[in-house]
Amino acid sequence: MVHFNKITATYFPNIGIDDFSLRINKGEMVFLVGPSGAGKSTVLKCLYGDVNIQKGVLSLEGSDITKLSIKQIQKLRRKIGIVFQDYRLINERTVFDNISLPLRIEKKSSSQIKLRTNEALYEIGIEHLAKRFPNELSSGEQQRVSICRALVKKPVMILADEPTGNLDPEASIEIVKIFERLSELGITIVMSTHNHSLIQNTKHTIVNLHLGTRVLS
Amino acid sequence: MISSFIFLIGESFKGIWRTRVQSFSSILMIMISISLLVAGYFVYTNFNRYSDELKTSYQMEVFFNSELDSIECQDSYNKIYSFPFIKKGEYISKKRAGDIFNKQFGQDINFVFGTNPLPCSGRYDMVESFRNIDGLNEIKEKISILSGVEDIHYPSEFIIKFDNLSSDLMAGFIIGGIIFLFISIFIISNTIKMVIHARRSQLDLLILLGASNVFIKTPLILEGIFHGIIGGILAGGISILMKTILTYLFYPTISLQIISNSILLFSCLTFGVLFGMIGSIMGIGRYLEK
């Protein structure tokens, strides 16, 4: 499904990835592990077209991401769910409105938006939070809302950049469990973390990064 | 599609409320800019009115040869009167000229000089397009070659000075107006940039979620237009008030009846929409280019 073939993407001296290769299958769950500045976020940014790739080929479902136009990148982003460390929720909107935003972008009808958003809320188990505002929620709840927003558009892949970075251990485990469940449903998950304890006993793929290169799988 | 459009309109209204401080300054700027433009327009139109009124007093006096008899004088007068650049005229016979002398100097000209030496003449008003120094000089050239014409008088020095003054003032109004228009749009676009800056994280999120440029730009442009509508209506209100007070205080010295209240309000609204739209397009242009 995803193939990084000798990708080099650097945006500041010594930040980014260099000659990076990786193959990810559909429905696979991959953890990108490494210290800060190792290139974890760059790998994710390459996948949603937010960084300039200087060398190599990056294919997603057969098409080369490095050759996409801005409009094609916008379309690509609509197929991918992104979860951020800082959740990036809009505090002035309710949880329901935050989650339905990707569907608004896809110009879905009001009835479709209502149906699909309620489905996503139910899938993540936060339907009781629908009418609340993000700043009324705990960190763990906010991150679950963020995952729900990524899930609502039925993405082929979810990219999570340090999603447990601001969470306590219990909430972090809960988030990883949600991702595992989504992976079992056939959604490819790529998650970056520097929390080794979180993935100690995982059966999923671990990609170790150090200074922009893959060091161990 | 309709629900998407309704959503975008709703977003722009919510945007105004979310960034109310910046929106307020944008609306205020639009209101001030348009009110000042209207004030400038009032000054310009009143100056124009005075200038036009003054120009109607531009008259050309043509003196005919003293050897012509009254019938030949009348013929020469009529020949000039028939030119298309003459609007109206007044024939002054020798006798009438003598009467004018008597009235002005309080003495009988026949008694002073023993005879009436004054020639017969014609006083002419020109059509509007010839009420300037170039037009008058052109007329003079055409008339002076006619037989029987002795001399042609008009207040050329005053006309030159007044023409220069009015063209300088007009140029000043136009240049000042254009500069002011650019400054207004610049300030409005910067205010919209502040609105965008206040919502930067939200716009960045939309970009990462794959929103198209149209989806991101539309609410911002609509927001600029709404700022313009509100600012335009307020400026219209201020202008109507300004017009009413000035008319009450200074009528008929200052006449602001040239433009009706409904046209004034509509013009302010149109300017507001234009200012808001241009300002927001300029404000968001560079942001999305990044």
Image (tube, rainbow, N blue to C red):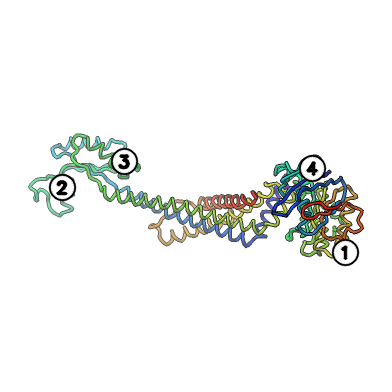
Write down the residue under mark 1: A170
- Kindly give the residue lying farthest to the left in the view shown: B114
* Mark seen at residue A59: 4
Label 4 or label 2, whichever lies nearer to me, is 4
Image height of B278 relative to B144, above or below: below
Label 4 or label 1, whichever lies nearer to me, is 4
Q: Is label 3 in contact with label 1 (beta carbons under 8 Å)?
A: no
Work out how far the residue at label 2 is from the one at label 3, CA to CA, in angstroms: 26 Å
Label 2 or label 3, whichever lies nearer to me, is 3
Give the residue type that dot 3 points to. Answer: Lys
Where disc 4 sits, the SS reads strand
Residue A127 drawn at (x, y percent): 85, 57
Residue B66: image quadrant is top left
Work out how far the residue at label 3 is from the one at label 1, CA to CA, in angstroms: 97 Å
Write down the residue under mark 2: B98
Give the residue type that dot 4 points to. Answer: Ser
